Image: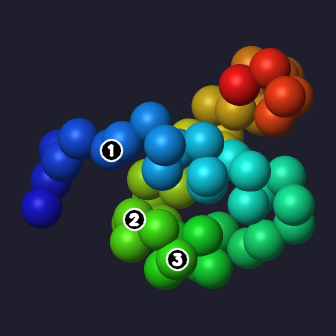
Amino acid sequence: MANKITDMSKIRKAIKFYCNGKSKLFISKYLSLSRNTVKKYISLFEVLGLSFEVI
């Protein structure tokens, strides 16, 4: 389904997993998110240049 609302807790978990070295495929399967959604939030995280602790 397009345009479903993603919980902020899932976004935080996705970024945490990414910072811990997990693959985007693992993250998408584990959190039941599409790979494009995971890629979108990870790319935003990288562009902002923040650390996980800040989030």
Residue ID at (73%, 60%) = 17
| Quarter of the C terminus within the rendering | top right
Residue located beneath label 3 in the image: 30
Residue at disc 1, secondary structure: loop
User: What's the distance in space between the residues labelled 1 and 2, CA to CA?
Assistant: 8 Å
Q: Is residue 2 above or below residue 50?
A: below
Considering only order in the chain, which callout, 2 or 1, is on the residue closer to the N terminus? 1
Q: How is the image coloured?
A: rainbow
Q: Which amino acid is tagged 3?
A: Tyr
Q: Are marks 3 and 2 in contact (CB under 8 Å)?
A: no
Q: Which amino acid is tagged 2?
A: Leu
Say few, some or many: other residues with alpha carbon within 10 Å of mark 2 (under 14 / 14 to 19 / 20 or more): some
Residue 33: mark in rendering: 2
Residue ID at (80%, 20%) = 54
Residue located beneath label 1 in the image: 6
Residue at disc 3, secondary structure: helix
